[in-house]
Amino acid sequence: MPRAIGIDLGTTNSLVAHVDERNRPRILPVDEGKPLLASAVFYPPDGAVEVGGAAKRRAPERPVDTILSVKRFMGRGPGDIRPEDRGIYQFDEVGAMVRLRVGGGKRTVTPIEVSAEILRVLRRAAGEALGGAPGGCVITVPAYFDDAQRQATKDAGRLAGLDVLRLLNEPTAAAVAYGLDKRSQGVFAVYDLGGGTFDVSILRLEEGVFEVLSTVGDTHLGGDDFDRLVARALLEGGLTPPDPDPSPAVLRGAVAAAQRIREALTDREAVEAEVELPEGHRLRARLTRAELEALIQPVVERTAAPCRAALRDAGVEKVDGVVLVGGATRTPLVRRHVKALFGQEPLTDLDPDTVVALGAAVQADALDRGGREDVLLLDVIPLSLGVEMMGGVVEKIILRNSTIPASATQQFTTYADGQTGMVIHVVQGERELARDCRSLARFTLKGIPPMPAGIARVEITYSVDADGILQVSARELTTGIEQRIQVKPTYGLTEEEVEHMLVESIEHAEEDVSERFLREWRVEGDRILSSLETAFAMDGELLQPDERAAVEERMRGLRTAMEGTDYLAVKAWIESVDAASKAFAERRMDKHVAKAMAGHRVDEFGDAPPATGAKGEDQDQGQEDG
Amino acid sequence: MAHCWSCKAQEEQQTPFCPSCRKIQPVGRTEDYFSLLGLPRQFALDPAELDRNFRTLSRSLHPDRFAKAEARERRLSLERATRLNDAHRYLKDWRLRAAYLLKLAGTDVFAEGKTFADPAFLEEQLEWREDMALAQADRDASGLREIAARARGRLQALETEVARCFEDDHWFSELVIDIARLLSRARYYDHIVADAERASAAVAS
């Protein structure tokens, strides 16, 4: 019978695990018998693609054709790759998705295809180890991965011929590996220090529901920093012949030696070694654990601020358990540091390199057996999903931390008379303005019958499945015209930006709120001004000249206020225009009873007007910000 | 009366699973958020019972239980689990629960354009906003927290008042407008709590 597998598709290394006959999760050997598969893919100009350690060894001589750390490109558009991540890779700038030029410039590949190569090797290795093709699989993703990144990961799985049962958050997987899901409740920290990235998540478990309360990280902090510091120190005194400016090849050799020495110092107090380096150099290394700790202390200290920020964001002061993830957390100094930070011994029974894959295997096995009676892992959506409205303001449709699967429906209306199309711009994030959120998709609902502004009713439904992947459909209610799309990424943000989005949304809240109100009131002002212009043209005769002059004077006042930045002033002028034009509106209504709804609507009191154009009116759903 | 899509057995009542073949069934037209969670259609509810029912039902309906089932069952499970989560989210929050009850009674109080002139309350709102602006100008974090706490107190009082309206047997005819007005007041207090908390965090940092 095919066995379910769990996959940790990591930035630096990837692993695959399964649950054995004795019900214990086990890592399967992958690369030349080793459990870790380097997340490296080499594309030669001719011949077969190489994956893993062999590919990684190609990197020095074939840097452009060897793709490392492809995870940071997943679900990204060409515009959102940070310069420091571009490295020496060549990107094709056409299209919405990132494409890398490889194989001596002969072909281009997407990050999804590169990831699929890694997954294919894992699938084959699992098949060999298990004596048959694997069954369904669970793939882990960072908790803060947005819709586009999750979709890309799932696509890569499918491309690799895997039956992806579920995507699982990495910190949740680590907690599952420790069996924390079997407790009835608690707050847990997951401290993940990998080779090049650091993040810390705070999870809350309540009756089988895991909620990621916060995730804070540093995408440029990791065990590699330890090794660079150690290598530099070793090169200073131990290199023969001495070389004040060693070549990149010598440096690489020294860093590799530093890593081995650092790892050896986990169990020993001192290490002495002599290493052959390229170009006839030799490195004599003598290092004690105390010396190592003095060297790496500053890097370890840098993880303290994110931990404190994560606790603060989560609104908790202490946790009931700390899980360590990532090889660099084996370092005794890191463990002492974590203990001091969280006030308790971290859980260390499981290998921090494999804990995420083990958790994924446990969950895959559970899904394969039709779920577990005792526990249910319910995940929540990491960032709110919304739609852009007139003025660039975001109306949130599904709020962050909603349990998934989830759905929500909101009704909107047209902004202009005779409007037949409506652009639906789907965004994800906590900020008030669409340009500050991640854009997920943009499509146009066409074929709305021409009607006066505000009459057509368009219903937008967002559905998020159990993997956190969104589907959007839009329906015009009077005609029943419907459009449904699976959201595909248009362009997006960098991983770091996603991480900082929540923090930012809090920092910018003040500025956002007044800017939001200003935009909304400006849109409202525009609408009132243009509908009055239209009304003057149509029914000007209903007003005496002096009456008209009075309205026009206030309209001028409104225009001036709209050029300013004080939303309260705009609001006051709108009320003033409304009051002045009330008699006119009433006479028009008498004249055009049938069309009375099209033009004016005396506005409600309150701070924020209902956004017009695409207007949210399902107020009973309580989906507004705040 | 519905038929099971799989074994064609007739069902008296809409239930998540067919009583004869145990296959998962689509959400029926007559099922509302209350019946989905096995609760009586009323405002008063026991939050512990709501959560307990939600968890029990989640365990049997969640897509995790159907990962290996056939496509139709997977789709039905997704549909049911989604509705269950939505129902839980709605009933958990007393404001949403009240608005939903009004909607079930055929009174969509928040339909377009319907707002409630509430001049006395508007006056009060302006005072709250003034207090908040003053505290913000003084960078008075504890003052802002105090405002949030006061607004929370108001929300609690509103909840009690809404509950009392629903207890009245004739609420649906005479008290609808009262409930709607209380709900729209609650919205303002919700905003005040959120704004005051954000402002106090901003001032403190």
Image (cartoon, coloured by chain):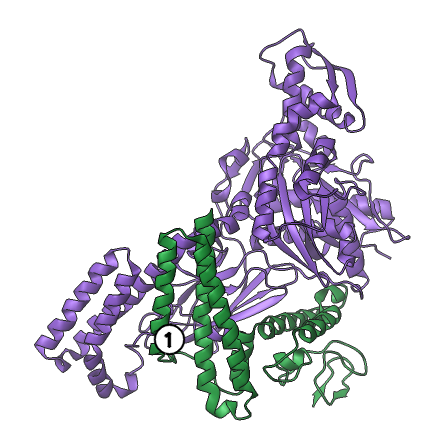
Chain colours: A purple, B green
Q: Left or right? Give the position of A427 relative to A208.
A: left
Q: Residue at horizontal 14%, vertical 82%?
A: A542
* In this view, A332 is above or below B128: above
Q: Residue at horizontal 51%, vertical 41%?
A: A81
Q: Left or right? Give the position of A363 relative to B168.
A: right
Q: Residue furthest left?
A: A545
Q: Position of residue A352 (x, y in %)?
A: 75, 40
Amino acid bearing label 1: Phe
Q: Position of residue A357 (x, y in %)?
A: 75, 47
Towards the viewer: A580 or A145: A580
Towards the viewer: B52 or B46: B46
Q: Residue at horizontal 45%, vertical 71%?
A: B187
Work out which quarter of the rendered image holds the N terminus of chain A and state it: bottom right
Towards the viewer: B165 or B108: B165
* In this view, A356 is above or below A590: above
Question: Can residue B141 be seen from the camera position used here?
Answer: yes
* In this view, A194 is above or below A226: below
Q: Position of residue B88 (x, y in %)?
A: 63, 72
Q: Residue at horizontal 32%, vertical 70%?
A: A416
Q: How many marks?
A: 1
Q: Label 1, on which residue?
A: B121
- Tag 1 subunit: B
